[in-house]
Amino acid sequence: MDAIAAAANAEEIKIAADYFSKLHYKKWIRVVEAGKVPKFEISSHNMLVKARATALRRWAWRIAEMPENLDRVELRDPSLGFVAYVPKGAIAKAGKLVESGNGAFPCASCHGADLKGSGDVPALAGRSPSGIVRQLYDIQHGTRTGPAVDPMQPEVAAMTDESRVYIAAYLASLRP
């Protein structure tokens, strides 16, 4: 992608920007709070999928994100997405953290009132919860650094694994 972008001239960039600005985002993640989730396995494409057996397993404070229909998702069917199983009560618990800032700044102070982004600050609403957890973890542990993420350092410094999961569940449940 970098090579293509570097080779594009101003007119091509404007055409691409006009095209992409007219696309409407479709919610891709369906968030389900659950105390038990379907048993899952890893597919041949390294994706978490429901196991053939229909049994359920107890669930703690983790996220299981899997395609609604593996065959259709692998074909890039835009009408299907993923389901994210999150702990019961996670969305309500995290809503308070996200809105209050829990001793830090509320997320909306940088990411916009509706958490859909503001200027160069990215949108959080409707994003993949496992992706959000990974980003928060990487920022907290110094794997992700730079001027764009430096303001997040104090926000995530004392964040626990559990609060990362809850926050990610809440953000993923929002309408993008």
Image (cartoon, rainbow, N blue to C red):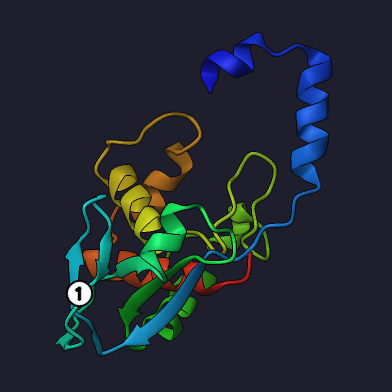
Q: Residue at x 54, y 58 (%)?
A: 77
- Amino acid type, callout 1: Ala
Q: Residue at x 20, y 74 (%)?
A: 51
Does residue 102 show up?
no
Residue 48 x %, y %: 26, 62
Residue closest to the eye, 140 or 89: 89
The answer to whether 53 appears left or right of 16 in the picture is: left
Residue closest to the eye, 133 or 74: 74
Residue closest to the eye, 136 or 16: 16
Give the residue at mark 1.
51
Corner quadrant of residue 64? bottom left
Quadrant showing the C terminus? bottom right
Q: Residue at x 38, y 45 (%)?
A: 153
Residue closest to the eye, 16 or 130: 16
The answer to whether 54 appears left or right of 97 in the picture is: left
Residue 89 x %, y %: 36, 88
